């Protein structure tokens, strides 16, 4: 009885544990979800790292970006006279014994400037000892050919590419070319001066250098008065050959100022004949023509080089310096085929402005210097004499009249029209300036002041 009771108690406390069957579908689903979340987390982490890594690196190790340098051309320096050039080229030693020549007068040393100065008799004596024949003529042109080839490194071909759609919806590409000259670099870009009318409609501008490398260029700025433009090419885009050079091929500006250039030998390079890489030799035949434009005057230099009416390029002297930029559309009537250029000295400040993408202020007058003789004899004050006031210009709206003499702009003394032009180039469009003029009233000149808000030149 007790055994039966004990067995019944054991039956009461006995428990059988049954294992739940594995749900394979649920397990596979959870595994897939876990793997997917891991992949998504990894992708998010990678993207976050890629995005934030440059920011964190720049924050920890700031990188200095190269700064654009302001372009400044050297001050104008008058070129050597023919007598000084002859004196400079006089041989210091005779390489081999020669027959006794006719005695040549000794050059005179200028104690103040340290230059060798030859008198007229000395120059004539030297020239009389030179005998030229056909051999010399050939040698001269061979030397000019080599010289023109040396100048080609400064010249580029600018191609303006324009795309049009014809009646059949086919894309038609047109290309217009002109020449340009490398004038400067600002640490980030190479700057090129060229003709604007030939490239103004181009959707894309390509520049071809002397080594036949071609890169895309951007329009930096243009000037509507002179029809010239400055293009920029990134220095990083230049060919390895140009990058490896110790110095970039940048043309040097010469002098086209007050000194008479008539008779100076010159070489036209670029596209003087209307085609790229053409060349012309000759001399300056006229350099006293003044082209009057808004707020500044330019010198036109005429040569005896017969070229194309579509000519573009540069005029060099024999010292390897630029003395003018070709602009045949400004040539006098009857001389359209003779190469005509803007004098570089008068153009230099505008090129500097364009190279820095700086806007040019506009007042709207045309004028000349007051000659000292006229000032002394007629009592006209020295300054910028106003010959014409352009319609709807800031000067006209302010009340400036023909016959006024501008003597100061913003308290800066104006001694002549060139002085006025250079002073105006220091101003900015929309700037209000005080202009002081002397106006004739009966038999005397009276001072008047005007407040003028300047405009801008495109």
Image: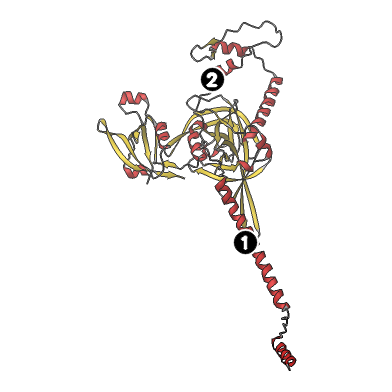
Answer left or right for 4 relative to 53. right
Secondary structure at numbered mark 1: helix
Residue drawn at (65%, 14%), measured in percent from left and top?
Answer: 130
Outermost residue toward the left in this view? 442
Visible in this render: residue 387?
yes
Residue on which disc 1 sits? 44
Label 2 neighbour load within 10 Å: few <14, some 14-19, many 20+: few
Q: Position of residue 425 (x, y in %)?
A: 43, 37
Residue drawn at (59%, 36%), measured in percent from left and top?
Answer: 182
Visible in this render: residue 197?
no
Q: Is residue 245 above or below residue 177?
A: above
Depth check: 373 or 153 in front?
A: 153
Outermost residue toward the bottom in this view? 1
Secondary structure at numbered mark 2: loop
Give the numbered dot on residue 115: none
Image quadrant where residue 219 sits: top right
Answer left or right for 328 relative to 35. left
In this figure, what is the number of numbered marks?
2
Q: Position of residue 245 (x, y in %)?
A: 66, 33
Q: Position of residue 439 (x, y in %)?
A: 29, 34
Residue on which disc 2 sits? 81
Outermost residue toward the front in this view? 2
Tag 1 near tag 2, CB within 8 Å = no
Q: Position of residue 47 (x, y in %)?
A: 62, 58
Label 1 neighbour load within 10 Å: few <14, some 14-19, many 20+: few
Image quadrant where residue 457 sits: top left
In primary-sequence order, the first of circles 1 and 2 is: 1
Depth check: 19 or 455 in front?
A: 19
Q: Is residue 423 above or below residue 372?
A: below
């Amino acid at each position: 009885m007790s055994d039966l009771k004990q067995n019944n108690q054991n039956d009461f406390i006995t428990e059988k544990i049954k294992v739940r069957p594995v749900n394979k579908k649920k397990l596979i689903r959870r595994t897939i979800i876990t793997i997917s979340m891991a992949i998504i987390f990894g992708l998010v982490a990678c993207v976050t790292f890629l995005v934030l890594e440059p920011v964190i690196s720049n924050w920890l190790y700031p990188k200095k970006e190269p700064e654009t340098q302001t372009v400044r051309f050297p001050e104008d320096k008058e070129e050597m006279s023919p007598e000084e050039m002859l004196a400079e080229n006089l041989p210091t030693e005779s390489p081999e014994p020669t027959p006794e020549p006719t005695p040549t007068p000794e050059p005179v040393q200028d104690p103040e400037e340290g230059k060798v100065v030859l008198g007229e008799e000395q120059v004539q004596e030297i020239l009389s000892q030179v005998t030229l024949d056909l051999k010399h003529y050939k040698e001269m042109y061979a030397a000019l050919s080599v010289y023109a080839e040396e100048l080609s490194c400064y010249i580029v071909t600018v191609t303006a590419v324009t795309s049009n759609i014809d009646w059949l919806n086919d894309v038609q590409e047109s290309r217009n070319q002109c020449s340009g000259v490398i004038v400067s670099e600002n640490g980030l870009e190479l700057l090129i001066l060229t003709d604007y009318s030939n490239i103004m409609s181009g959707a894309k501008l390509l520049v071809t250098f002397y080594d036949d490398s071609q890169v895309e260029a951007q329009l930096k700025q243009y000037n509507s008065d002179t029809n010239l433009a400055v293009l920029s090419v990134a220095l990083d885009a230049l060919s390895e050959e140009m990058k490896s050079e110790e110095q970039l091929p940048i043309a040097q500006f010469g002098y086209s100022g007050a000194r008479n250039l008539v008779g100076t030998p010159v070489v036209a390079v670029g596209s003087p004949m209307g085609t790229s890489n053409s060349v012309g030799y000759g001399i300056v035949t006229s350099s006293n023509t003044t082209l009057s434009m808004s707020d500044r005057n330019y010198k036109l230099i005429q040569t005896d080089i017969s070229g194309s009416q579509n000519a573009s390029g540069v005029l060099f002297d024999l010292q390897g310096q630029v003395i003018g930029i070709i602009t045949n559309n400004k040539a006098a009537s009857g001389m359209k085929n003779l190469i005509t250029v803007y004098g570089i000295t008068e153009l230099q400040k505008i090129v500097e402005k364009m190279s820095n993408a700086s806007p040019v202020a506009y007042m709207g007058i045309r004028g000349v210097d007051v000659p000292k003789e006229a000032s002394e004899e007629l009592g006209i004050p020295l300054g910028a004499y106003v010959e014409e006031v352009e319609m709807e210009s800031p000067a006209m709206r302010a009340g400036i009249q023909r016959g006024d003499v501008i003597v100061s702009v913003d308290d800066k003394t104006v001694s002549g029209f060139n002085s006025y032009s250079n002073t105006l180039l220091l101003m900015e469009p929309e700037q209000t300036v005080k202009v002081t003029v002397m106006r004739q009233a009966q038999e005397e000149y009276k001072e008047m002041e005007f407040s003028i808000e300047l405009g801008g030149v495109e």
